Image (spheres, helix red, strand yellow):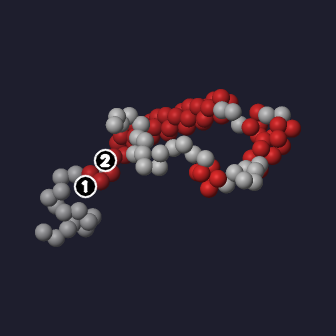
């Protein structure tokens, strides 16, 4: 079973079998183009959805007047006054330190 001079065995029925995909090349190209268009459409829809979401969200740096941004930074920078450390708060607490941990939805 030596191959014939063209590289194909004599028993092979169609010497052009490996090139048969080219017969449907236009259909393949059309299918790939449709898939690309669909992906582009989905990307555009996703981007529009993100832009709509951004409009609905409250972003202080964007939505507050300039003076409010400075006020907000000052509020974040405030610390608790002296004498209100964790130990002081615990000494005035009315909570039971031996109580079970609260788990929402569980009845005791």
Q: Quadrant of residue 100?
A: top left
Residue 20 — which label? 2
Whole-percent x and y of residue 9? Answer: 19, 63
Element type where label 1 sits in the image:
loop
Q: Residue at x 58, y 31 (%)?
A: 49
Give the class, few, some or many, for how many residues have Cα within 10 Å of label 2's Cα (few <14, many ≥20): few
Residue nearest the observer in this picture, 8 or 50? 50
Q: Residue at x 58, y 51 (%)?
A: 90
Label 1 or label 2, whichever comes before in sequence order: 1
Q: Which residue is mark 1?
A: 15
Q: Quadrant of residue 75?
A: top right
Whole-percent x and y of residue 51? Answer: 64, 33
**Residue 29 seen:** no
Quadrant of the image for the C terminus? Answer: top left
**Above or below for 85 versus 51:** below
Q: What is the total number of numbered labels drawn onto the structure image?
A: 2
Q: Residue at x 23, y 62 (%)?
A: 8
Element type where label 2 sits in the image:
helix
**Residue 8 seen:** yes
């Amino acid at each position: 079973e030596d191959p014939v001079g063209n590289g194909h065995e004599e028993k092979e029925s169609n010497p052009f079998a490996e090139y048969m995909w080219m017969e449907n090349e236009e259909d393949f190209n059309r299918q790939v183009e449709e898939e690309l268009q669909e992906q582009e459409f989905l990307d555009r829809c996703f981007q529009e959805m993100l832009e709509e979401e951004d409009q609905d969200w409250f972003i202080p740096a964007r939505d507050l007047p300039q003076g409010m941004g400075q006020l907000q930074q000052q509020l974040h920078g405030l610390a608790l006054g002296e004498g209100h450390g964790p130990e002081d708060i615990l000494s005035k607490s009315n909570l039971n330190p031996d109580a079970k941990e609260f788990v929402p939805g569980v009845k005791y």
